[in-house]
Image: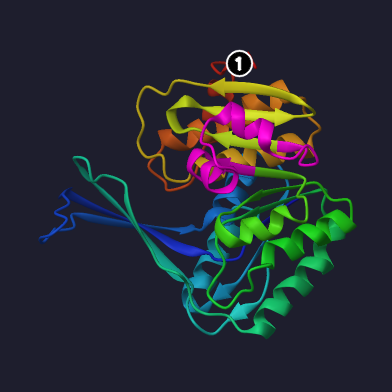
Amino acid sequence: MILAVCPNPSVDTYLYMDTFNMRGSSRVTNKESYAGGKGIHVAMAIAESGEDVSLLAFWGGERGQWMKEECEKLGIKCFGPKLDNNNRTCITIKSAGENDDTEILENGSEISEQDYKDFIKVFKQNIAKVNVVSMSGSWPPGAPNNAYAEMVKICNENNIPHILDATGIKMHKALLEKPYGIHINKDEAEELFGTNNPDKALKIIQDDIKIVALTAGSKGLYLRKDGEIMHANVVVDSVYSAVGSGDCLSAGLSMALANNKNIEDTAVLATACGAANCLRPELGMLYKEDILKLEKEVKLLHL
């Protein structure tokens, strides 16, 4: 069983328009909404792949209840504190031109100290039931800066392998607790380690982080595992949207970890999952048949 953690779920909404005018009026031609937030995308990708997955999140108001029901329809066991105020909404603009895939992200409703303690309590209660944890994304306002650090510490104390995908001060604090694995992109590598060169960043990151996945957009995945470094990439002819691809890649990493895959198979699965997300219109979602096809097309290079 894999546990996906999503502290800050969102109703992810596509707004379709012919042209998105940055300083003028833009008319919406269609609107679609999905259950979202990085951890929810991870859980949905794992469920679609046929693996057992549960999901810990804050469920806020009517939006939170709707998202929980959408996830449960996919066979995902959901739990976590309920909030009175609604979860956030995040908008992705789909239009012609350079402004396509513009994202507008809400922060989320503020949580109390007790809400946070309840979240950690539920996490502790369920940690013994899983063999891998995936922690992804932002926290709502009100969460302490050491939120992920505390969860990493709990995982380490219980010998639970885990993958962390986070940014900013919460990632900085979590690194002090030596997470089992991390997923970052080039910009985050520069912020954390002073270089956006994937090869240099992987060599700078401390050896006690057992898995480091560094994504570089169209240049693919740079993966360090068990002292080896691997580059993996796959060409996708038609990209519908790359939004959520990093989350699907995290899902691939988590599934590979749960199934004790070697570095080559881990790189292939993670890369195929990330690319599969680009092929379909659903936001942050993939399909198993696309993963199986793309796995055969991933190119690997030992560095």
Where 278 falls versus 32 (above or below)? Answer: above
Q: Residue at x 57, y 78 (%)?
A: 142
Tell me if residue 54 can be seen.
no
Residue 266 screen position, x and y as percent? 69, 28
Splitting the image into 4 quarters, where does residue 6 fall?
bottom right
Q: Is residue 297 magenta?
A: no
Residue at 10% across, 60% down: 24
Name which residue lies at 70% across and 57% down: 174
- Above or below, 266 against 111 in this view is above
The percent position of residue 180, horizontal first and vertical second, equals: 77, 45
Name the outermost residue toward the left: 24
Q: Amino acid at mark 1?
A: Leu
- The residue labelled by disc 1 is 300
The residue carrying pointer 1 sits among few (fewer than 14), some (14 to 19) or many (20 or more) residues within 10 Å by Cα, namely some
Per the image, is 210 magenta? yes
Seen from the viewer's position, the closer of residues 290 and 141 is 141
SS class of the residue under badge 1? strand
The answer, for residue 294, to whether it is visible in the render is: yes
Q: At which x and y percent is residue 112?
A: 61, 84
Can you tell which quarter of the image residue 262 is in?
top right
The magenta-colored residue range is 183-211
Q: Residue 212, position in %: x, y? A: 68, 37
Q: Which one is nearer the viewer's eye here, 290 or 134?
A: 134
In the image, 266: left or right of 161? Answer: left
- The reply, left or right, for residue 174 in relation to residue 89 is right
In this rendering, the answer to whether 168 lies above or below 290 is below
Q: Is residue 19 left or right of residue 53?
A: left
